[in-house]
Image (cartoon, grey):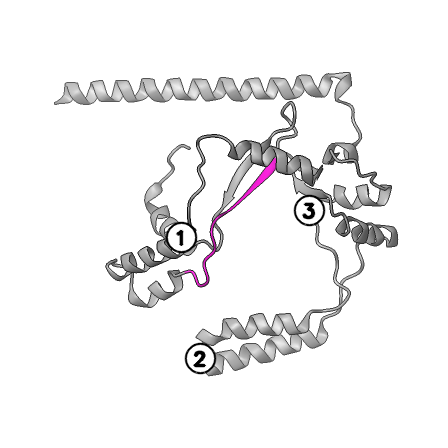
Amino acid sequence: MPEDWETLERITFQSSSTTFTAIREKQLQKFENLVEKKRSPESTFNKTDSVVINLSQVNLSDSATSILSKGLKFAIALRSIPKEDIISVVENALRKLRKSEADEIREEVSHIIRKARPPKPNLTRAEKEAVCELRKMDDSLILPADKGNATVIISEEDYRKKACGLLDDPTYKELNSDPTAKIQRNIKDLMKHSSIPQEERRSLIQSAPKPPRLYDLPKIHKDGIPLRPIVSAIDSPTHKLAKYLAHSLRPFSGLTAT
């Protein structure tokens, strides 16, 4: 009925307008807070101090602070080209190609490797020595912050206390045995009765699966710097299957709001 469509359209429009207004006000409030913080004289800080947060008792040298301020994703320039590693990865990728195509790619890769030269060093001598010192720290951990581009140094003892405190919540419970093998068997049984093409099923079974891994990131923007628990399912029994399903469902998800 036309009246029903008009009612539905009115309700939809009102709902979308309310949502838009709420989101807009929230974003404007965030913008105003950022502007106010920038104007505040207390907001003046040293850039290195803002990206390296030392919560441990370790005294960091200037060189150690400098290398940590580059971020945990900073790639140290290699002293030599890892030819063996490159060849191993290429050969593994060529297994699915025809011999003629594989030989052509091998020849081109071989030509590139022969002409390749190591990149220029991107660390000073003092920073290289600092990297070795940081690797020798046994009682402290170097972690990325939960938010922002900051690197946090925290003592292993404090980290364990806070992590165990999170697990004391009744939401979590200890299992009597590792369910990884059982989940792997269930996935194999489901795959046998699925409509997934036979040639793709094997690639969706995780070889040597591992249980999901729990780790925590420090919330440096919160009082007391609590930890945020994160579960990584990489290499778990459902990892490859979840990626396959996410890719398959993506065209049907549209532009839904999150």
The residue that mark 2 highlights is 98
User: First in sequence: mark 3 or mark 2?
Assistant: 3
Q: Quadrant of residue 51?
A: top right
Tell me if 13 is positioned left or right of 172 in this view: left
Q: Residues in magenta?
A: 206-217
Query: What residue is shown at x 76% (from left), y 47% (from top)?
Result: 137
Crowd tier of the residue under label 3, counting other residues whose Cα lies within 10 Å: few below 14, some 14–19, many 20 or above: some
Crowd tier of the residue under label 1, counting other residues whose Cα lies within 10 Å: few below 14, some 14–19, many 20 or above: many
Q: Is residue 180 visible?
A: yes
Q: Nearer the viewer, mark 2 or mark 1?
A: 1
Q: Which kind of residue does numbered mark 3 sit on?
A: Leu
User: First in sequence: mark 3 or mark 1?
Assistant: 3
- Residue 148 position in % (x across, y down): 64, 34
The residue that mark 1 highlights is 238
Per the model, the C-alpha gap separating discs 3 and 2 is 40 Å
Q: Which kind of residue does numbered mark 1 sit on?
A: Thr
Per the model, the C-alpha gap separating discs 2 and 1 is 31 Å
- Residue 21 position in % (x across, y down): 44, 18
Q: Quadrant of residue 185?
A: bottom left
The residue that mark 3 highlights is 72
Q: Which kind of residue does numbered mark 2 sit on?
A: Arg
SS at mark 2 in the image: loop
